[in-house]
Amino acid sequence: MTTNTQTPEALTPDQVINLDAYPLHQPESESFARIAAQAKAELDTKQYVVLPNFIRPEARRQAVAQIGTVLPAANHNASTRNCYLQRRKDPTLPDDHPRNILFPASTWMLAADRLPADNPLKTMYYWDNMIDFVGRIVGTEQLYANDDPMQPVNAVCYKDGDQSAWHFDSVNAFTMTLMLQAPESGGRFEIIPNTRRDDDECIDRVRQAVQGDSADCVEVAREEGALCIFRGCNSLHRVSPVAGDRMRIMGVFVYEKEPGVIGDPEVNETVYGRATAAAE
Ligand SMILES: O=C(O)CCC(=O)C(=O)O
Ligand SMILES: [Fe+2]
């Protein structure tokens, strides 16, 4: 299957990103500085920030339509796992250790090499001005695109009943997602900011959280078209079960602090169902 074909109607960055609200094309402007600083402050205090209406409606529709076309190539990633993204228990630890509390998780993963080169998600991801904007928000001077054939930009689809169990993101200091299509119901993105710390696993708190004590749980409002940047390494988060026929479709983007990063083939095998890139 050939997916990396440029079509004449490929949208340009200004047709994909809502530059009226987010002037990424004017990085020296006062409004750019204000918006980026405000987003950074929110991320630093709440561990997440939402930028509504980030993608233009026509680009969103085009992205969704293309994803529908390649959906048969998605990998059904279904397993039970703990909040550390491990699929096996540790018999040396007590049954009620969070390491040994497993929940079902299920999504349909479209890797970057399954998405057409002109998919608006890729146009957004690779645009230098976008990379600079995200770097400003997360406080990293220079970010780089991930060089793995599968990992940089994904579409994660949740059908009726799919969900992502409570988890910490393991590798990345921050995660960026774009709500391309909201489901009829369910599919709520919930986060417990600072559930643990770099120097403290906070096992009791983590246990309570995964067992349903959600005192500090925040539901992050995700309208269609909203971009979200969050720090998921120390903040448990999940996607509640999706209900209804309309898929929840999320774009997920991975940026790196250094150039040339490629993924671990074993991780790719687990997430995408294969260790090597799709044949062109
Ligand atoms: O689909 C979402 O809203 C969040 C997915 C997620 O947990 C992640 O990408 O780390
Ligand atoms: Fe996550």
Image (cartoon, rainbow, N blue to C red):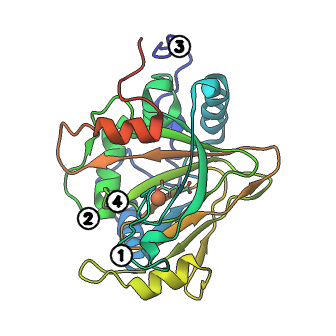
Q: Does 275 sit left or right of 141 as displayed?
A: right
Residue at the spot 70% in from the left edge and 59% down from the top edge:
241
Q: Secondary structure at mark 3?
A: loop
Q: Mark 4 highlights which residue?
A: 170
Dot 2 or dot 1, earlier in sequence: 1
Relative to the observer, which residue lies in front, 155 or 263? 263
Mark 4 or mark 2: which is in front? 4
Residue identifier under label 1: 44
Cα–Cα span, label 4 and label 2: 19 Å
Question: Mark 4 vs mark 3: which is more N-terminal?
Answer: 3
For disc 2, the marked residue is 139
Which quarter of the rendering shows the C terminus?
top left
Sequence-first tag of 1 and 3: 3
Q: Say the numbered circle drawn on residue 89.
A: none
Kindly state the secondary structure of the residue where label 4 is placed: loop
Q: Secondary structure at mark 1?
A: helix
Q: CA distance from mark 2 to mark 1?
A: 9 Å
Q: Would you say residue 48 is visible in this rendering?
A: yes
- Counting from the top left corner in percent of width and height, residue 152 is at 37, 38
Picture quadrant where residue 124 is located: top left
The amino acid beneath tag 3 is Thr
Residue at mark 3: 7
Q: Are marks 1 and 3 in contact (CB under 8 Å)?
A: no
Kindly check if marks 2 and 1 are in contact, taking CB atoms under 8 A apart as contact: yes
Decide: is 133 above or below 273: below
* Residue 180, x across and y down, in percent: 62, 45
